[in-house]
Amino acid sequence: MFIDPILIQSAKRIYRTYCDSRAQVGRKPLGVALNKETLKGQLIFGERPILLPGECFININQMEAEVYP
């Protein structure tokens, strides 16, 4: 499944902010629920993310990978 690189960059920014502020204390999220229009998102820690209309889920593995298909 192709995910727009802009969405991945936005998710990485949200994840990086979390890591910078809570690197030693926080848990590792499963990914980010991201609004495709506003590029605002929330970290997801639960196993089954519930997405609102217009949102997509970016998996942590997709954010950590250096090369995207």
Image (tube, grey):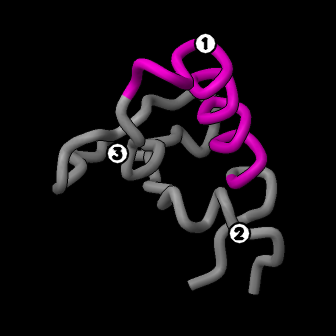
Q: Residue at x 61, y 66 (%)?
A: 62
Q: 40 above or below 35?
A: above
Marked residue nearer the N-terminal end (2 or 3): 3
Q: Amino acid at mark 3?
A: Pro
| Chain part drawn in magenta | 8-26
Q: Amino acid at mark 1?
A: Ser
Q: Secondary structure at mark 1?
A: helix
Q: Mark 2 = which residue?
A: 65
The image position of residue 66, as x and y in percent, is 81, 69
Q: Residue at x 82, y 77 (%)?
A: 67
Closest to the observer: 1 or 38?
1
Q: Residue at x 65, y 70 (%)?
A: 3
- Tell me the distance, in whole angstroms, between the alpha carbons under discs 2 and 1: 21 Å
Mark 1 surroundings within 10 Å by alpha-carbon count, few (fewer than 14), some (14 through 19), many (20 or more): few
Mark 2 surroundings within 10 Å by alpha-carbon count, few (fewer than 14), some (14 through 19), many (20 or more): few
- Labels 2, 3: front one: 2
Q: 56 above or below 1?
A: above
Closest to the observer: 29 or 26?
26
Magenta span includes 55: no
The image position of residue 69, as x and y in percent, is 75, 87
Q: Mark 3 = which residue?
A: 53
Q: Are marks 2 and 1 in contact (CB under 8 Å)?
A: no
Q: Amino acid at mark 2?
A: Ala
